[in-house]
Image (cartoon, rainbow, N blue to C red):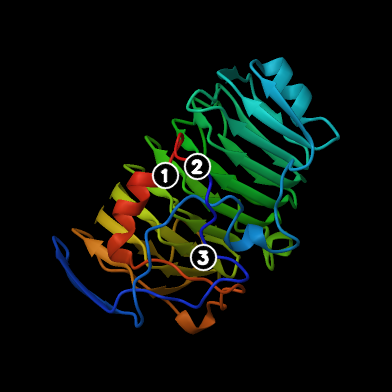
């Protein structure tokens, strides 16, 4: 049974976390101080938290027709239909390319059987869409691509791995997106926000994304890599055995790195990647095990998160996320 947990939402409480955390690992000591008290363990939400709860909220196909897709033809028919649909994916949907997704849809896997292979989902100006409880693997391009002013998208409780390009790219003016309880693994360029350094006119003032309770497991970079957006909220995620870096802020972006758990991560944060100009990072309450120090820059320039939120201390995030992220956990 789904139980709504007040973690990040317009009616939630103020920030709460642990008192003082001192972590000693292979890269030395790191100390962070956050006041207040711990909170109870998290449970799956029945509606989105963070940015996808704003701008009128994200309801997907709620109130529309419930259908079941067992092959690519049925899947295409329903996801491109003009009406509201709750689309249950039962079994493997093998796509030959990027499948366009229409507005006002909920796409949800049945049990642990729902799989998207060979291709990916393309949100191109799509609005009010929920994607939950699906496994994505072997995409010839991106597993999920969100672009061209798509808005109010909730990506929740999925398993994403082994795409040819990105696992989850958010770009070209898209906005009000929450990425929660997903497991990302076996991949290099994982999660991008903002596709190029030259797209400031379309992206600045948009690309507002919340990453919460995701598990980045053995991936290499872009968790996420951010351009222009301010603020992006990266909160209560678990990073384990990351090859290059955790979260990067570039091109003047503002990222709040908030109460995450880093284990065996050489560079938890980065303020410059490739040829991009530097970005800005503010951090609070993160927990480090066998990891490097968190690098910040101009924390005062990172805008305040525009919703009230409460959460759990960084020290408890590993247990919460490993128990709850991925498919079959709703």
Front position among marks 3 and 2: 2
Task: Indicate which disc residue 325 carries.
Answer: 1
Determine contact: label 2, label 1, CB under 8 Å: yes
Residue located beneath label 2 in the image: 157
At x 74% / y 43%, what residue is drawn?
62
- N-terminal of the pair, mark 2 or mark 1, is 2
Q: Is residue 86 visible?
A: yes
Mark 3: few/some/many CA within 10 Å (<14, 14-19, 20+):
many
Between the C-alphas of marks 3 and 2, the distance is: 18 Å
Circle 1 packing at 10 Å, graded few (<14), some (14-19), many (20+), is: many
Asked where in the image residue 77 lies, by quadrant, the reply is: top right
User: Which residue is located at x 69 percent, y 68 percent?
Assistant: 205
Q: Earlier in the sequence, mark 1 or mark 3?
A: 3
Q: Which residue is mark 3?
A: 233
Alpha carbon separation for disc pair 2 and 1:
6 Å
Q: Using the numbered discs, state the Cα–Cα distance from disc 1 to disc 3 in whole angstroms.
A: 18 Å
Dot 3 or dot 2: first in sequence order is: 2
Residue 195 in the figure: left or right of residue 263: right
SS state under label 2? loop
Label 3's element? strand
For residue 74, which quarter of the picture? top right
């Amino acid at each position: 049974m789904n139980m709504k947990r007040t973690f990040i939402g317009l009616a939630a409480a103020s920030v709460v976390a642990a008192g003082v955390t001192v972590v000693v690992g292979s890269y030395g000591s790191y100390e962070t101080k956050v006041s207040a008290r711990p909170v109870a363990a998290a449970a799956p939400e029945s509606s989105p938290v963070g940015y996808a709860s704003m701008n009128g909220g994200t309801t997907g196909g709620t109130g529309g027709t419930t259908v079941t897709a067992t092959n690519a033809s049925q899947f295409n028919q329903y996801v491109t239909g003009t009406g509201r649909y709750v689309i249950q994916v039962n079994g493997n949907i093998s796509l030959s390319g990027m499948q366009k997704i229409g507005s006002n849809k909920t796409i949800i896997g049945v049990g642990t059987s729902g799989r998207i292979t060979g291709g990916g989902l393309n949100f191109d100006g799509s609005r009010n869409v929920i994607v939950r409880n699906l496994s994505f693997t072997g995409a010839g391009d991106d597993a999920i691509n969100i672009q061209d002013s798509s808005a109010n998208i909730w990506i929740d409780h999925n398993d994403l791995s082994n795409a040819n390009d990105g696992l989850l790219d958010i770009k070209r003016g898209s906005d009000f997106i929450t990425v929660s309880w997903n497991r990302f693994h076996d991949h290099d360029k994982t999660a991008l926000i903002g596709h190029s350094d030259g797209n400031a006119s379309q992206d600045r003032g948009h690309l507002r994304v919340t990453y919460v309770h995701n598990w980045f497991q053995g991936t290499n970079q872009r968790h996420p890599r951010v351009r222009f957006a301010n603020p992006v909220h990266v909160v209560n995620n678990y990073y384990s055995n990351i090859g290059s870096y955790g979260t990067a802020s570039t091109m003047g972006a503002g990222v709040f790195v908030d109460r995450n758990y880093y284990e065996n991560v050489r560079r938890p944060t980065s303020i410059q990647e490739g040829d991009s100009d530097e970005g800005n990072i503010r951090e609070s309450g993160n927990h480090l095990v066998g990891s490097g120090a968190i690098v910040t820059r101009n924390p005062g320039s990172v805008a305040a998160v525009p919703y009230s939120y409460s959460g759990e201390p960084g020290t408890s995030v590993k247990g919460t996320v490993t128990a709850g992220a991925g498919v079959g956990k709703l």
